[in-house]
Amino acid sequence: MADDKYPIQQKLADLKKTLDSDPTDVESAIRYWSGLASFGGNDVRSGGFVIEAFRGSALASGAGVVAFARAYRELSEKNGEKPRAELFDEELLQALKTRLPHLSNGDQAIVQWLIASIE
């Protein structure tokens, strides 16, 4: 019943549930991030949601690191919110730095921007 009454909330909850079932899945993170961008016609994304959506995939793979950095860059360009150091734990920061040398030049630039923003 609640699904019918609040379809927007239910859709986002379903996306979050899928992400929670495998936080390392980049595609699930991207779908959840996109859902936050159009929640009831509003973009509710924030730095905390970048962490929530992409942290697991950033810890797991280079593709996750790139998706994480791109989401933060998009957030910064859309609403001016810059990365905040207090949202980054040591494990996440280490994952960004460790994978950096293995990325393409364009992807390295985005990740370097992110690291420089919080150090």
Image: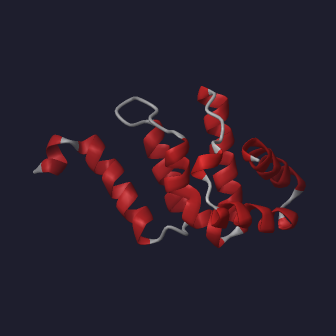
Q: Identify which residue is drawn at 66% across, 63% down.
A: 90
**Where is residue 105 drawn, in percent x and y?**
89, 54
- In this rendering, the answer to whether 94 lies above or below 8 is below
Q: Identify which residue is drawn at 68% across, 47% down.
A: 70
Query: Between 97 and 12, which is closer to the camera in this rendering?
Result: 97
The residue positioned farthest toward the left in the image shown: 1
Residue 8 picture quarter = top left
Q: Identify which residue is drawn at 44% across, 63% down.
A: 19
Q: Identify which residue is drawn at 70% across, 60% down.
A: 93
Name the colour scheme: secondary structure
Count of all numbered marks drawn on residues in the image: 0
**Where is residue 34 drawn, in percent x and y?**
50, 45
**Where is residue 46 drawn, in percent x and y?**
52, 39
Query: Between 72 and 90, which is closer to the camera in this rendering?
Result: 90
Horizontally, residue 97 falls left or right of residue 22, namely right
Horizontally, residue 58 falls left or right of residue 34, namely right
**Where is residue 103 drawn, in percent x and y?**
83, 62
Horizontally, residue 69 falls left or right of residue 57, namely right
